[in-house]
Amino acid sequence: MTAAVSIQAVSQRYGQATALDRVSLEIEAGEFVVLLGPSGCGKTTLLNLIGGFTEPTEGAILIGGRDMAGVAPKDRPTTTVFQDYALFPHMSLRDNVAFGLRMRGIDRGKRAAKADQMLALVGLEGRGDRRPHELSGGQRQRVALARALAVEPDVLLLDEPLGALDLKLRRQMQDELKAIQRRVGTTFVHVTHDQEEAMAIADRIVVMNAGHIEHVGPPREVYLQPKTLFTAGFMGEINRIPVAGGRAPFGPVDVPDGTLCIRPEAITPAGALRIGPCKVEDAAFFGAHIRVHVSPLAATDLRLIVHLPQSQSVEHGGVLDLGAETWVVLTE
Amino acid sequence: MIRTLSWAYLAVAYAFVFLPVAVLVAFSFQDGRLPVPPFKGVTLDWYAKVLGNDDLTAALLNSLLVAVVSSLVALILGFLAAHALARVRLPGSALMRGVLIAPMTVSYLIVALGLLNLFNLTGLRLSLLTAGIGHVVVNLPLCFAITYAAMGDHQRSAERAARDLGAPEWKVVTLISAPMLAVPLAAAFFLSVTFSWDEFIIAFLLTRFDVTLPVEIWSMLKSGLSPATNAVGSLVFLVSVTLVILLELTVFRKRP
Amino acid sequence: MSLAAKDRRQAWGLLAPALVWTAAFFILPFFAMIALSFAHMEGREIVRGFDPGNYTRIFTDPVMLEALRNSLEITVVVTVISIVLAYPLAAIIAFRVPACWQRLALLLAVLPFWTSYVVRSYSWLLVLGQNGVVNKTLLGLGLIAEPLEIASTRAATVIGFVHFFVMLLTLTIYANLIQLSPNYARAAQDLGASRWQCFTHVILPLTLPGVITGAFLTFVLCIGDYITPQILGGNTELTLPQLIMLQLGRSGNFPLASALSVVLMAVVTLAYFASSRWLRLDRV
């Protein structure tokens, strides 16, 4: 029902181009791991390697301790939810979901019962006779999920499964995906370029960039304690302030030399790391917060982005005395 | 194993497809009276003979004339109809599409026979014109189908924008619709030209004194096997292939 | 006049030339042909009227019945063989040949399509004839003692047809295969399907409409063709189009030719209804 995945120094090259460069990663059984990165970072390549659709140029992939070299996709304990769902348009939903069981030679009655049970799990009970073209995008996504889970894989691979959905539906499906994963206990490896989606569902996030892994950790750590500038920037908006010789542009600071990274919402009037008085250049009401551009009076060239609570009164041209509550210093 | 079988199949298929053409071209150079083995040596005499034959060159020009003119008429009629049906919901749109496509599902022989009867009744003399009319009948559905399929939402909104900016309908058609559909229009036109240029049965039944190339070749065949026929066939093949390759390199290359 | 009404008038104006042309030169002659099929000949004169005699003759005269049967048999055999040969060819080009070479491979596979139709049948005569390339080669290799009688038989007609339609079907089937998302095949294999199961359960059903459309096209073009059986089939047996041309030429019997054409048309219509569920003629 569930298995660990071990990726050991895997490289993938296409001619001159390197899609993955000696990537190693341990995924525990039953874990929900999200591979996150911009397009072309190698996340989909890595997913395809686990699924067996391509063979790595170098390195090994173990699933449940078993080396997968030379094992075809159909013989691997993995199934995939494809980005375009790849539902078979000529089959009913029931036949789609039962397809894997049919290939395993399970008799008609049993596989229909299992298919109906899986459709119920994803909230589509009683719709087994429908055809894929009668469904909305979100419903198709659920069928694809049910079809992949029906064969009880040890590892489920999801290739940007929510990419085609609109924002509201995507947020709703994230919650359902997480709930279903808890219920079935299968290892989920999920690929996305949406960092909010990643934080919402992942036990651990794997941030990837240009064919290598930048950071692996729980959402909180990856967001608050990024190990690299790339991770810091990719996980959300961040202010980057150069620090040299114990001095930042706005004055002395008690941090090591490097790039001082502060999230917009970590800057408050009460923050411990003092930035000092700042002039409000621009402000906009965003509902949950007020987004403000400020320049420290001591360094008017520096522009900082600050998210202040709705209750704070912000006046254009006014001065606020600000400090950072949390920060991280990166040296690269 | 499967890989080897695939390549072997591909090789055999190509051999089958090219066998008659290879034989045709090879024996057009036959230095002898019969285009069958044994091969007696290379000569260009048959080409000289064919190119000096006035009936053949006349037929060739007739074929070109009929092909180009009938294709142009079919293209204009088909494009205008597609433009109208893609733009406005008319009562019975589906029926009209069906009527316009219908000649495609009917054998050329039947189209030709129907027209032959019509022309007999109306007293219209058989000529290149009557053959051309027949070719428009069979190429119109093709031009209509190709251009209709190519007209999408993108096309429609560009046309609406043009009208919104004050363009009269004829300018919308000539300045927006036609240029946007340049590739499918060219494809439809050249497909029609190649069909018409090579069409036999309609041209055979609907021409009398001036004939097209396929009809002229047909009458050559009656006198039995001859390397001259091979030479004509090879020339036609050369022209068609050049046209196809030119199209491939120009018109279709632009496709995204 | 409202805008919508003006639009509609304009649309009718654009539509009219094509509709008038089709009505005048296709629909009208077609009905005139049906009317003519109920006329009969007295000497060399056509006598109009309502006389079903032509049809009675077609369905009782053994020569006519045999021509009908020959046409049907040849067409069905050609359609089936062409699909069976073209499908693997299209699939190999779509799935085995590297993407950058596919257009070239396809262009090559259908290059002889662009030879003159009349000349193509003639070339097969050179290949299959008594002194043709095939016989000379087999004799030379000592595989046969006597030349094979292929030309002027039904086999030659079928080979000539298959050659043409394999090219046509390769094009249509390839177009179908290439527009399938590669994820269908991956999904099937991911769920445990073998290559063969993937083909029979997923790829084949998804390409069936294209195959049926191609088959229908083959059927229509094949059953109505005069040239190929006339050149390659010799005079051993007649097909329906040959019979029609005979009526036109020898006796000028237009009514009988019309009746035969109506029968030919009826056969095509039957084929249309048999396959209409899957047909997509507007997307050939």
Image (tube, coloured by chain):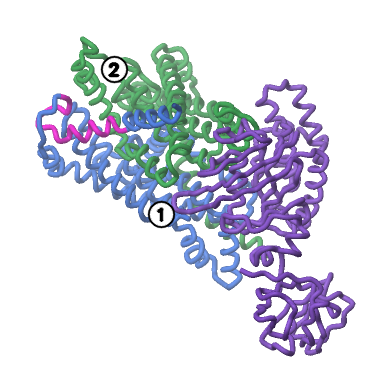
Circles 1, 2 touching at the beta carbon (< 8 Å):
no
Rate crowding at label 2 as few (under 14), some (14 to 19) or many (20 or more) other CA atoms within 10 Å: many
Q: In this structure image, what is the colour of chain C?
A: green
Q: Which chain is purple?
A: A
Residue carrying label 1: B253
Apparent side of residue C13 relative to residue A109 in the rendered image (left or right): left
Report the residue marked by disc 2: C150
Which range of residues does the magenta coloring cover? B18-37
> Along the line of sight, which residue is nearer the eye, A146 or A136?
A146
Relative placement, left or right, of A48 versus C85 is right
* Residue B147 in the image: above or below residue C266: below
Asked if A133 appears above or below A283 in the picture, the reply is: above
Give the mark toward the camera: 1 or 2: 1
**SS at badge 1:** helix
A315 displayed left or right of C71: right
Give left or right: position of A320 versus B146.
Answer: right
Q: Is residue B34 magenta?
A: yes
Which chain shows up in blue? B
x then y, percent, for residue A178: 80, 47
> Gap in Å between the C-alphas at discs 1 and 2?
43 Å
